[in-house]
Image (cartoon, rainbow, N blue to C red):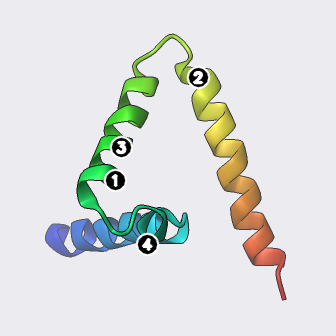
Amino acid sequence: MKRRARTRHLIELGGLVRKSGLVDLTGDDRAVLYGAFLEIAALLQSQNREQNIALWRSRGSRAFKSETDAP
């Protein structure tokens, strides 16, 4: 059961990568995507961690809401 939950979680994360447009914007270049994720990880280790999280959470929440509100 744990493996099934992990698989579902990974599929959902992949869906977010696609939904964000990153797959198309990078030409599905996995090295670019991985580099971008490493950059995000570095930002989360900086002094501005909480600011970045708040900003990204706000943007993500607005995007999810606009999709829900769309006809």
Tag 1: residue type? Leu
Name the residue at 15% across, 70% down.
3
Report, in whole angstroms, how far the alpha carbon at label 1 lies from the one at label 3.
6 Å
Of badges 1 and 2, nearer the viewer stands 1
Place of residue 47 in the rendered image (x, y in percent of width and height, measured from the top left) = 51, 10
Of badges 3 and 4, nearer the viewer stands 3
- Residue pushed farthest bottom? 71
Indicate the secondary structure of the residue bearing disc 3: helix
Report, in whole angstroms, how far the alpha carbon at label 4 lies from the one at label 1.
14 Å
Place of residue 58 in the rendered image (x, y in percent of width and height, measured from the top left) = 72, 44
Q: Earlier in the sequence, mark 4 or mark 1?
A: 4
- Circle 3: is it few (<14), some (14-19), or many (20+) Cα within 10 Å? few
Tag 2: residue type? Glu
Report, in whole angstroms, how far the alpha carbon at label 2 lies from the one at label 3.
17 Å
Place of residue 17 in the rendered image (x, y in percent of width and height, measured from the top left) = 44, 63
For mark 2, what is the residue? 50
Task: Tell me if label 1 and label 3 are in contact, CB under 8 Å.
Answer: yes
Tag 3: residue type? Phe
- For the N terminus, the image quarter is bottom left
Place of residue 59 in the rendered image (x, y in percent of width and height, measured from the top left) = 70, 48
For mark 4, what is the residue? 15
Residue 70 marker: none
For mark 1, what is the residue? 33
Q: Earlier in the sequence, mark 4 or mark 2?
A: 4
- Circle 4: is it few (<14), some (14-19), or many (20+) Cα within 10 Å? few
Write down the quadrant of residue 28 in the picture. Answer: bottom left
Q: Front-most of 42 and 24? A: 24
Indicate the secondary structure of the residue bearing disc 2: helix
On the picture, is 68 further left or further right than 57? right
Name the residue at 64% across, 43% down.
57
- Circle 1: is it few (<14), some (14-19), or many (20+) Cα within 10 Å? some
